[in-house]
Structures are given as C-alpha cells and as structure tokens.
Image (cartoon, rainbow, N blue to C red):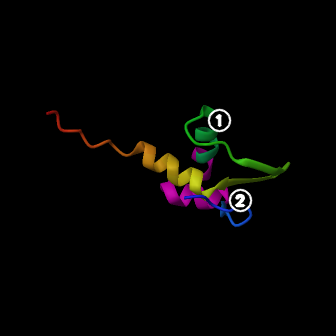
Amino acid sequence: MSTNPISARLLTVQQVAKHFGVAERTVWRWEALGTLPRGLRLTRNTVRWREEEIERHVASLAPRAEQPTT
C-alpha cells in the first residue's frame, strides 16, 4: 500500500508518547537510542514522526507466530 507523502499523517511527541503510554522524555530517549524511528526535524524546535513508520515499528515489536514444521 503506497501512501501519498503529502497526505501522510505526522505525529507530535505528545501523540507518540500517548500511543505507547509513556512520558515524552521516554520518546526522546528511545529515539536517541535508536529504539524508535527517527523523527523528522522540520525546524530547530519542531519534530514529527510519520504515523506509518510508528505503526510499522509497533508491528515489528509484536511476537511472530511460530510457523508449523512439516
């Protein structure tokens, strides 16, 4: 599924923190550690995360179902 970059939803640090149920400081720490995708630096004091990147990241954290062996 291809998303038009112009219509891609950008999330604030507050929205990302709420999504994960953590403090904003934790979002910054995760980004610095590389645990969370890097945000887009729009200006010196404005950072946004692409919603689709956050959703992909969450999906990558989900445990994989074991494949049956034949």
Q: Nearer the viewer, mark 1 or mark 2?
A: 2
Density class for disc 2 (Cα within 10 Å; few <14, some 14-19, many ≥20) is: few
Q: Which residue lies under the disc numbered 2? A: 5
At x 63%, y 40%, the residue is: 31
Q: Label 1 sits on what residue type?
A: Ala
Which picture quadrant has residue 51?
Answer: bottom right
Residue 2 at what x, y percent from top left? 60, 58
In the picture, the quarter occupied by the N terminus is bottom right
Label located before the other in sequence (1 or 2)? 2
Check if residue 15 falls in the magenta segment: yes
Q: Residue furthest front?
A: 70
Residue 69 at what x, y percent from top left? 16, 33
Check if residue 33 falls in the magenta segment: no
At x 33%, y 42%, the residue is: 63
Q: Label 2 sits on what residue type?
A: Pro
Which picture quadrant has residue 7?
Answer: bottom right
In 3D space, how far apart are the residues under numbered discs 1 and 2 (Cα atoms)? 25 Å
Q: For the magenta stretch, what is the residue range?
A: 11-26
Question: In terms of depth relative to the viewer, which is nearer, 1 or 13?
Answer: 1
Residue 68 at what x, y percent from top left? 18, 38
Check the image and report above or below for 52 versus 69. Answer: below
Magenta residues: mostly which secondary structure? Answer: helix
> Mark 2: which secondary structure?
loop
Q: Which residue lies under the disc numbered 1? A: 32
